Amino acid sequence: MSRHALVTYFYQSAFTVSLKKTLIVFSYRQTGLSQLAPEQQLSEKDFQGFNNILVFVPNNSLTHHDRKAIYSWKPSFPITYILSEDAMKDTPDLPHIRVCREGDSFSVAQAKVSVFGSTDTGVSYLVEAEDVCVFHAGDLNLWHWREENTLREITRAEESFYDKVAAIPKDKVDICFFPLDPNQGGLYDAGANHIIMAIRPRVFFPMHFDGRTEIANEYARRSLSRRTVIFALTQPRESALVDLTGALPTVRSTSPGRHGRPGLRRGSVDLSAYTQEDPFSQTDLPVSMQEEE
């Protein structure tokens, strides 16, 4: 049985995942966002043809919860909103809203949703729909600033993050969206490295890189794991077709001609990249990925 997903990036933490008859929307924002031109915003034509549309709001910040945009969509569309508890304030009275908290697990619109924690406000989501399992971290990350925080603060941040990640099932996630925030300074990618090794998603998309496209592209170039394809979508409305059918996933950009980025990436690896000098030599990171156009 074929398993495909079309992943589209909008900005910061906003993605859609299009499956056969299900559209999943994560952390969508367009209000006050000059980086997203009107023609790049979600519109009615994006919702056509889907039996179920699931809109996930992990917390109450504008980055993840654009009330003005998401509640303006026509109620005639088969939309279900899934909100963290802190996002309920000033939410309109709509019939298809599901409020959740960390630890919840429920079925909605033919999808199974498991709610996990965050190291900031709100929650993170694991969504299983049409035989595809998707994790969106929201603001779950290893939030510390090594150049500024004390050792005690860093230790507390690490303990909290590792505890939250430990609850997420291993070897189950097909597609993972996770922060890669360069504003953290040194070791800004520590959280991403850990979650790739801890839960081993099949495909990993960085997010929350604050418009620093070079950060996401460089991470995808250098931090490939033997089990995970890491792929950077960096331009608003850029999409990738993810083929999860085989033992090794294939990710193909649907925006041909992107300078400096291969159009196709497969999950085959060259283990010669493992050296004793490599700080990740005893882990899943990094290895060299064989790439094809």
Image (cartoon, rainbow, N blue to C red):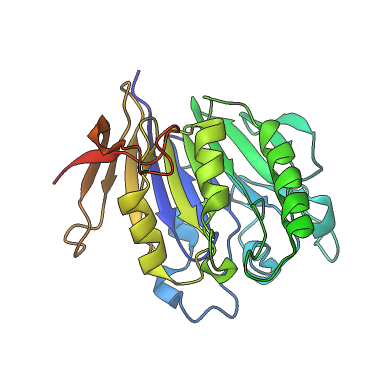
Q: Residue furthest top?
A: 1
* Foreground of the two, 26 or 247: 247
Residue lying farthest to the left in this orientation: 293
**Residue at 62 percent of width and 52 percent of height:** 76
Q: Is 49 left or right of 143, judged from the image as shown?
A: left
Asked whether residue 235 is in view, the answer is: no
285 vs 65, left or right, is left
Q: Residue at x 49, y 24 (%)?
A: 131
Q: From where the camera sits, is residue 27 visible?
A: yes
Q: Give coordinates of residue 8: x percent, y percent.
A: 41, 54
- In the rendered picture of this protein, how many numbered marks are placed on residues? 0
Residue placed at 30% from the left, 22% from the top?
246
Q: Is residue 28 above or below residue 107?
A: below
For residue 202, above or below residue 257: above
> Dividing the picture into quarters, in which one does residue 129 lie?
top right
Q: Is residue 235 above or below residue 3?
A: below
Could you say where residue 271 lies in the image, as x and y percent from the top left? 27, 31
Residue drawn at the location 58% of the way across and 52% of the way down: 26
Q: Is residue 46 left or right of residue 172?
A: left
Against 99, residue 151 (above or below) is below
- Residue 81 appears at what percent x and percent y? 69, 49
Instruction: Tell me where residue 226 appears, x and y as whole percent.
Output: 35, 31
